[in-house]
Image: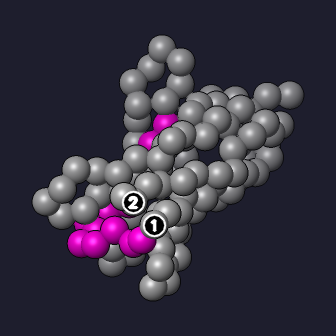
Amino acid sequence: QVQLVESGGGLVQPGGSLRLSCTTSGSRIPNLLAMGWYRQSPGKQREWVALMSTVGVTTYTDSVKGRFTISRDRDNAKDTIYLQMNSLKPEDTAVYYCNMRPRGRQDYWGQGTQVTVSS
């Protein structure tokens, strides 16, 4: 069974940077339509942050435009997506989840990784 494994969260000061990674374990996910990153803060609903289609079209929520970058690597054994986060702000504090959406089947989600921006 394919799982998404996340890494890269942590504590960073305002203005700092972090890079999140999300890798498929077991095998690649066939017939992918899109990949992305979401986040959830305490007391709030999960929101999308950055999305990428399999042809490389990206889109970002307004609050992270110009600061976050989603990218992708793949080889014969796995898919990996990244979220490079620069100029971090306290309001970026949340649990970040990666997502991979295949055609005709339910989405895959990572386990979540905590990002805390604080001085």
- Determine if the magenta segment contains residue 29: yes
Looking at the image, the residue that sits furthest to the top is: 43
User: Which residue is pictured at 39% across the width and 60% down the height?
Assistant: 2
Residue at the image position 39 percent from the left and 72 percent from the top: 28
Residue lying at the far bottom in this picture: please name it: 76
Which stretch appears magenta?
27-39
- Asked which quadrant contains residue 103, the reply is bottom left
Q: Main secondary structure of the magenta part?
A: strand
Residue 2: give its label: 2
For the residue pair 61 and 10, the one nearer the viewer reads as: 10
Asked if the residue under mark 2 is in contact with the one under mark 1, i.e. CB atoms within 8 Å, the reply is yes
In the displayed structure, 39 sits above or below 58; it is above
Residue 42 horizontal/vertical position (percent): 53, 18
Which mark is first along the chain, 2 or 1? 2
Give the side of residue 115 with respect to residue 16, left or right: left
Q: Is residue 68 visible?
A: no
The residue lying at 49 percent from left, 63 percent from top is 25
Secondary structure beneath label 2: loop
**Residue 34 covered by magenta stretch:** yes
| Most foreground residue, 47 or 75 | 75
Report the residue marked by disc 1.
26
Residue type for callout 2: Val
Which quarter of the figure has residue 59? bottom left
Amino acid at the residue labelled 1: Gly
Residue plotted at (44% across, 20% down): 44
Q: Is residue 11 above or below residue 109?
A: above
Give x and y (percent) for residue 10: 75, 40
Q: Secondary structure at mark 1?
A: loop
Work out how far the residue at label 1 is from the one at label 2, CA to CA, in angstroms.
5 Å
